[in-house]
Amino acid sequence: MRKTPETIRLYGMTMCVRCGAKIYERVFNHDLNRFDVYKGQDEYVGSTYLYSIDEMEEIDKALKNGECPLCDNWKMDCEVE
Ligand SMILES: [Zn+2]
């Protein structure tokens, strides 16, 4: 039996298997985190700030379910165009 994981998670980094985007989880302050999104050759796309534990858990769950900030058009707080 072979199972392909939707996402690859290691040390707070999630990689999207659809577009190859890398989502890095960074500690933003004591409790809350920030996710930095990179695509291609480590090209910075933007960041999503999490203002509550609920939001963090929601995003964490979404990433584990294979969702991606780029493929699924998440709103980003700071974005490079
Ligand atoms: Zn993606």
Image: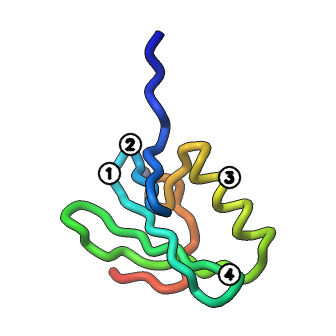
Pointer 3 residue = 61
- Comparing labels 1 and 3, the label whose residue is closer to the camera: 3
Looking at the image, residue 62 sits to the left or right of residue 8; the answer is right
Cα distance in 3D space between marks 3 and 2: 16 Å
Q: Of 19 and 81, which appears nearest the observer?
A: 19
Whether the residue carrying mark 1 lies under 8 Å from ligand 1 is answered with yes
Residue 22 against residue 36 in the figure, above or below: above
N-terminal label among 2 and 4: 2
**10 Å crowding of disc 1: few (<14), some (14-19), many (20+):** some
The residue at 60%/81% (across/down) is: 49
Report the amino acid beneath label 1.
Answer: Gly
**Which residue lies most toward the top here?**
1
- Comparing labels 2 and 4, the label whose residue is closer to the camera: 4
Pointer 1 residue = 20
Q: Are marks 3 and 4 in contact (CB under 8 Å)?
A: no
> Of helix, strand and loop, which one carries label 4?
loop
Whether the residue carrying mark 2 lies under 8 Å from ligand 1 is answered with yes
- What x and y, as percent, mark residue 44? 31, 76
Report the amino acid beneath label 4.
Answer: Leu
Residue 74 against residue 64 in the figure, above or below: below
- What x and y, as percent, mark residue 77? 55, 83
Q: Of 68 and 24, which appears nearest the observer?
A: 24
**10 Å crowding of disc 4: few (<14), some (14-19), many (20+):** some
**Which residue lies most toward the bottom here?**
29
- What x and y, as percent, mark residue 14? 45, 55
Pointer 2 residue = 17
> Of helix, strand and loop, which one carries label 1?
loop
Q: Of 18 and 15, which appears nearest the observer?
A: 15
Pointer 4 residue = 32
Report the amino acid beneath label 2.
Answer: Val
Q: Quadrant of residue 39?
A: bottom left
Q: Quadrant of residue 45?
A: bottom left
